[in-house]
Image (tube, rainbow, N blue to C red):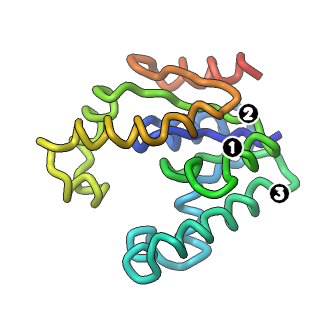
């Protein structure tokens, strides 16, 4: 069985995914890290040197590669992955999908502490960050809500979220 976690940046996909994979004794794949490894280049460098269209093409290619693995695994997607091409149909056809739904305030509080790790956030500035998050969530929510399950993550510990995910399947 493939388990796919999706949601906005800082919603907890990677942290929850790692713990879920440990608990299920499955390998864990972060799609962005997988792409960086395969392309031997950071995501920001790929965007800078090859552009978004190229990135979205290879993102789908590597998503398919992970979804077609024979073994069970947990996969966390990039925040934009569900919104492009036929990605959500692929995810729902080949896995059990979960939208980790965090509120604007939760995401804002997490992202403002991570500006050095997330170049996009650093360029927006804290004063514009909440509006940026709200706009993005509005645009992406219809894709995120295509997941088979939605788990609200606000004010929950990682173990609590992991147990809730397991109870749903």
Q: Residue placed at 29% from the left, 57% from the top?
A: 120
Residue identifier under label 2: 24
Q: Quadrant of residue 10?
A: top left
Image quadrant where one finds the C terminus: top right
Q: Are marks 3 and 1 in contact (CB under 8 Å)?
A: no
User: Nearest the camera: 64 or 155?
Assistant: 64
| Cα–Cα gap, marks 2 and 1 | 9 Å
Image quadrant where one finds the N terminus: top right
Q: Residue placed at 27% from the left, 43% from the top?
A: 132
Q: Earlier in the sequence, mark 3 or mark 1?
A: 3
User: Residue 151's x, y, as percent?
Assistant: 56, 22
Q: Secondary structure at mark 1?
A: strand
| Cα–Cα gap, marks 3 and 2 | 19 Å
In-image side of 87 versus 33 (left or right): right
Q: Secondary structure at mark 2?
A: helix
Q: Residue placed at 58% from the left, 55% from the top?
A: 84
Task: Single out the mark in the foreground, 3 or 2.
Answer: 3
Q: Are marks 2 and 1 in contact (CB under 8 Å)?
A: yes
User: Residue 130's x, y, as percent?
Assistant: 23, 36
Q: Secondary structure at mark 3?
A: loop
User: Residue 51's x, y, as percent?
Assistant: 44, 76
């Amino acid at each position: 069985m493939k388990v796919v976690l999706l949601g906005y940046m800082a919603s907890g996909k990677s942290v929850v995914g790692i713990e879920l994979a440990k608990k299920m004794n499955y390998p864990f794949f972060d799609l962005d890290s997988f792409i960086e490894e395969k392309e031997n280049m950071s995501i920001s460098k790929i965007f800078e040197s090859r552009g978004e269209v190229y990135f979205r093409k290879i993102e789908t290619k590597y998503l398919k590669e992970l979804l077609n693995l024979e073994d069970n695994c947990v996969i966390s997607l990039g925040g934009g992955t569900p919104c492009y091409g036929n990605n959500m149909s692929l995810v729902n056809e080949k896995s059990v999908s979960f939208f980790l739904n965090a509120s604007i305030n939760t995401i804002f509080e997490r992202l403002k502490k991570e500006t050095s790790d997330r170049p996009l956030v650093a360029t927006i500035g804290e004063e514009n960050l909440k509006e940026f998050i709200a706009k993005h969530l509005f645009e992406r929510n219809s894709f995120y809500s295509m997941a088979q399950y939605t788990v609200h993550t606000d004010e929950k510990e990682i173990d609590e979220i992991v147990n809730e995910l397991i109870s749903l399947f």
